[in-house]
Amino acid sequence: MIEGLVVTHGELAKVLIDECTRILGPLDHVKWMDTHRLSAVAITDKVKNIIGNKPFIVFVDCPGTAPALRSLAAIQEGQAVVTGVNLPMLMSFIVHREQMDVPHLARKMVTDGIRTLEVLWPIPENGRED
Amino acid sequence: MADSGKWSRGLILRVDDRLLHGQVVYGWGINGPIHKMWLINDRVAFSPKERELYESSLPKEFHGGTMGLLEAVLAWKAHSPEECTLGVVESVKDLHFLIQEGLRPIAIHLGAIERAGDRLPVTEIVALSSEEKNI
């Protein structure tokens, strides 16, 4: 089974996992960590300690920031970093992680994450795209 | 966050021991005045792995990348930047080197410098050793 680690600024990661658990039930092999007050080296070391060399997807909040950059420094072959983590993305991860390998699942996470972004009001002139 | 209206052209040098993180990318870049961003650091510039790591993490809309200290000096001597450009260095020592070699930024910004060795806090996020303070 592909494992997940959510790394964010502050406790956003914990909240995402808590809410995912509330919706889908207890989550196995999904961890979280907060980078607040950790040095760059400490973030990388902590991520490395959690993921080891197991198949893992590391979810982070913003590209170009310490969670993303330091997680990228920590991963090895067979692991991936996905940016822009949100709740639908995490739920898709839980549902699909036993059916795909890491690269395919990582790409699906991005597709499913993007799919949830839309303007609900005002209604777009051309109507909603389904 | 950096004031977008304050700077329109020229080089801003920032000292930040993480080089690239949220304040740099989102405060100065995506939501700020910066059009080009250079991470000026010998360790990063001379390590293919580090270089790839940082360059792949720079937002695609920025021109720039990584360069060594001497490379930065040569680039400055070839032509000073016309767009608003942020050069990020890791330490006060690196900043001092660039200034001594002739770089003339329109502003210097002390970002985050972690407390380490004989550095003592100067502000909540900046710690300097007595040597660095003298520089």
Image (cartoon, coloured by chain):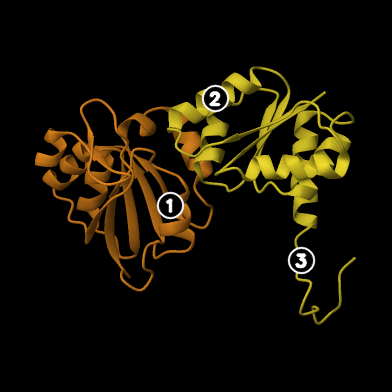
Chain colours: A yellow, B orange
* Residue of label 2: A46
Q: CA distance from mark 1 to mark 3?
A: 27 Å
* Residue of label 3: A118
State which chain disc 1 sits on.
B
Residue B87 x %, y %: 32, 50
Estimate how packed mark 2 is, as few (under 14), some (14 to 19) or many (20 or more) residues with alpha carbons within 10 Å: some
Q: Residue at x 76, y 48 (%)?
A: A87
**Residue situated furthest top in the rendering:** A53
* Front disc: 3 or 2: 2
Q: Is residue A4 visible?
A: yes
The reply to whether dot 1 and dot 3 touch (C-beta < 8 Å) is no
Q: Is residue B48 visible?
A: no
Q: Amino acid at mark 1?
A: Gln
* Residue of label 1: B23
Residue A5 x %, y %: 68, 32
Q: CA distance from mark 3 to mark 2?
A: 35 Å
Residue B10 x %, y %: 27, 63
State which chain disc 3 sits on.
A
Horizontal arrangement in the rendering, residue B28 relative to residue A90 (left or right): left
Q: Amino acid at mark 3?
A: Glu
Give the image quarter of residue A29.
top right
B102 above or below B68? below
Assign a secondary structure to mark 2. helix
Image quarter of the C terminus of chain A? bottom right
